[in-house]
Image (cartoon, rainbow, N blue to C red):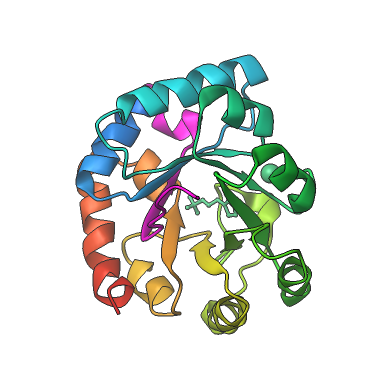
């Protein structure tokens, strides 16, 4: 059984953007403001530091078992920290192999950047992947290498294809308070944000504003 997973407002952490505040403090405030799922992502941290960071985030959410904590890339860290799942990209370990390591009781997310990526994900054995991250909706300075945005129309098409194949779909890239409603209106199950929360002076307020922007669409 997978843990409960409501991706309505999915926070992906960035240690530098949170700095000097501890990531766990930012996460805790953002969850109080309306974040429903958290992915711990730090491309610069050692495995050792990522494990400590994941544990700190988990501890900060000890009273919020409804909010899953997922680790970007690092299956070993996710298992050691007792995280709820892993999110991998196209260049990480193959999803089937990650599922074999994770077992049936954790979440697995996979980034897809094109219709071809999604078609490949839909051919995986059922139950391999739970959610695809459609990436990027808009080009973003947070991950310049993600390239140009897919655009809302293409994202909507990918969402319909993912849903037809039984997968949840979230969208990421360039989503802020001003764009969250439009991103949600594509039919995604949730929107992912990095800078809109991690770089905010008040992560609690930023999360609440985002949540208010997406909730009408997300509640459909
Ligand atoms: N994957 C695709 S775009 C992106 C990731 C991790 C970064 C999104 O950051 P922001 O600040 O929400 O645009
Ligand atoms: Mg990755």
Is residue 15 located in the magenta-colored stretch of the structure?
yes
Whether residue 19 is visible, yes or no, is no
Which of the two residues, 18 or 171, is positioned nearer the viewer here?
A: 171
Residue 85 vertical placement versus 134 (above, below): above
Q: Is residue 201 left or right of residue 159?
A: left
Which sits in the foreground, 66 or 70?
66
**Which one is in front, 120 or 174?**
120
Left or right side of 182 for 139: right
Residue 21 x/y as whole percent: 34, 23
Q: Is residue 164 left or right of residue 201?
A: right
Residue 118: which quarter of the image? Answer: bottom right
Q: Is residue 23 left or right of residue 209?
A: right
Farthest front residue in view: 1
Q: Which residues are magenta?
A: 1-20
Measuring 42% from the left and 64% from the top, which residue is drawn there? 190
Residue 127 in view in this figure: yes
* Residue 47 image offset from top left, x and y in percent: 66, 20
Tell me which corner region of the image, top left, top right, bottom left or bottom right, holds residue 184: bottom left
Which residue appears at 63% of the width and 77% of the height?
Answer: 165
Question: What's the magenta bit mostly, secondary-structure-wise?
Answer: loop
Residue drawn at x 39%, y 51% is: 4
State the quadrant of the C terminus. Answer: bottom left
Which quadrant contains ligand 2?
top right
């Amino acid at each position: 059984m997978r843990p409960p997973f409501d991706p309505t407002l999915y926070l992906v952490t960035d240690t530098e953007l949170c700095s000097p505040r501890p990531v766990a403090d930012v996460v805790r405030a953002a969850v109080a403001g309306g974040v429903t799922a958290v992915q711990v992502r730090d491309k610069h941290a050692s495995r050792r530091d990522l494990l400590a960071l994941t544990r700190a985030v988990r501890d900060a959410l000890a009273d919020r078992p409804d909010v899953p904590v997922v680790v970007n890339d690092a299956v070993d860290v996710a298992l050691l920290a007792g995280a709820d799942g892993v999110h991998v990209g196209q260049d990480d370990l193959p999803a089937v192999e990650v599922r074999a390591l994770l077992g049936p009781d954790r979440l697995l997310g996979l980034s897809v950047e094109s219709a071809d990526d999604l078609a490949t994900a839909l051919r995986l054995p059922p139950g391999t992947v739970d959610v695809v991250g459609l990436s990027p909706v808009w080009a973003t300075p947070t991950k310049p290498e993600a390239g140009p945005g897919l655009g809302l129309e293409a994202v909507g098409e990918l969402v319909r294809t993912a849903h037809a194949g039984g997968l949840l779909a979230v969208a990421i890239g360039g989503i802020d308070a001003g764009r969250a409603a439009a991103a949600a209106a594509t039919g995604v199950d949730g929107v992912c944000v990095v800078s809109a929360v991690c770089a905010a002076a008040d992560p609690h307020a930023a999360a609440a504003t985002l949540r208010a922007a997406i909730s009408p669409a997300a509640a459909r």
